[in-house]
Image: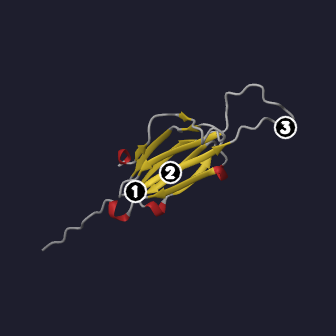
Amino acid sequence: MANEVKKTGGDLARTETGETRDMGPTFRPATDIFEKDDVVTLAIDMPGVAPESVDVSVENRSLTVRGRIEAPAPEGYRRIYAEYAAGTFERAFSLPETIDAGGIEASHKHGVLTLTLKKSEAAKPKQIKVKAA
């Protein structure tokens, strides 16, 4: 099941075009996928992204996660060198039909976005009781 939740897009971690230059680079966050009986869990690294800056959406069985990170200089300071830049985390996944898109839950703690994807009722294993004839 977990291998059915497929990542989409290339392996490029940072991109910058004329349109995105003012917004900073786009980062491809590392993601772990775990499966349990009736649920698939995604753990997506988004360090420095505030929970209110995260956007999770599903459209046409495509799950997209975006988060904006700001890197302001501390108050009263002037930035003279930076390796940590403002930008956007973005990742997309193709969802199999067995996932209930309406039942996705999201939480954010310590820079990790956790998505819980519930399997649809039709995808859950069912026990068939055998009756004596």
- Tell me the number on the disc at residue 64: 2
Question: Residue 60 location in percent, x, y?
Answer: 42, 58
Question: Residue 132 location in percent, x, y?
Answer: 15, 72
Q: Amino acid at mark 3?
A: Glu
- Report which residue position mark 1 lands on: 38
Q: Quadrant of residue 33?
A: top left
Q: CA distance from mark 1 to mark 2?
A: 21 Å
Question: Residue 66 location in percent, x, y?
Answer: 57, 48
Residue 58 vs residue 133, the one in the foreground = 58
- Report which residue position mark 3 lands on: 75
Sequence-first tag of 3 and 2:
2
Residue 56 vs residue 37, the one in the foreground = 56
Q: Is residue 72 above or below residue 50?
A: above
Q: Residue at x 48, y 57 (%)?
A: 58
**Residue extending furthest toward the bottom:** 133
Residue 88 vs residue 23, the one in the foreground = 23
Q: Nearer the viewer, mark 1 or mark 2?
A: 2
Label 2 packing within 10 angstroms: few (<14), some (14-19), many (20+) = some
Q: Residue at x 47, y 40 (%)?
A: 32
Element on which disc 1 rests: loop
